[in-house]
Amino acid sequence: MTESQKVPLVIAAKDVDIGIMEGQFGQEDVVPIILEVLNLPGKLRASDGTAIPVKDYVNLKVTVPEEGKLILMRNNEILFENTINEAISFIGLEPDIDYVLKYASSSDSDDEIEKLTNVGSSTIVDMFTSSKQPTSDKSYQNPRYIVGGTLIGAVNLAGLILIRKVLKE
């Protein structure tokens, strides 16, 4: 039945737009939406879901290979300029705007990277050259994966408990 396929998802957070969104969304979209509400930018590696835009801003996480100077610009205006050594998150950026990221390594003056990115949804940008790509995969230590895995486990456990309760009756 059609009504059994329409399950509401209620989100209550201080910076979430109030309203009703209708459309075709699947269960694969639930975790990306929750991560978006928690201001954890990026995409899960094993998820095809997309976050529904529930906020009027987006977040951008920038990772760098080593200590260096990072500049974030919009329309030739510098929004951020500082030395960072691993990663930084920008929360509250305007969506669907072109941003320019410039990175210059402190140890190698020839190692400069410039990337143009349009942040339509919260995302992660890696400022690595092909020679500086990380070789080890420590994604399991990423807070996004920990939160996402915990949420998936909790949803599955709740579902199993409900099924058991229904079967007992």
Image (cartoon, rainbow, N blue to C red):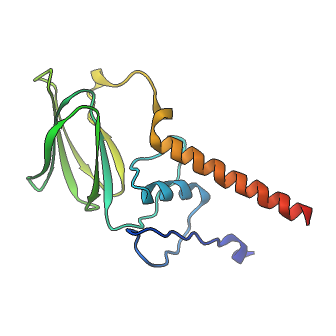
Which residue ends up furthest to the left in the rendered image?
A: 76
Q: Which quadrant would the C terminus be assigned to in this image?
A: bottom right
Asked if residue 81 lies left or right of residue 169, the reply is left
14 is higher (above) or lower (below) than 81: below
Give residue 98's position: percent from left, percent from top. 21, 55
For the point 36% across and 24% down, the residue is: 134
Give residue 131's position: percent from left, percent from top. 28, 20
45 is higher (above) or lower (below) than 98: above
Give residue 145's position: percent from left, percent from top. 51, 41
For the point 27% across and 28% down, the residue is: 65
Q: Which quadrant would the N terminus be assigned to in this image?
A: bottom right
Asked if residue 1 lies left or right of residue 51, the reply is right
Which residue ends up furthest to the front in the rendered image?
A: 14
Q: Nearer the viewer, residue 114 or 147?
A: 147
Count of picture labels = 0
Asked if residue 166 lies left or right of residue 51, the reply is right
Q: Nearer the viewer, residue 39 or 46?
A: 39
Give residue 155's position: percent from left, percent from top. 66, 55
For the point 37% across and 68% down, the residue is: 15
For the point 40% across and 47% down, the residue is: 42
Where, by quadrant of the figure, is residue 54 drawn? bottom left
Where, by quadrant of the figure, is residue 71 drawn? top left
Asked if residue 45 lies left or right of residue 6, the reply is left
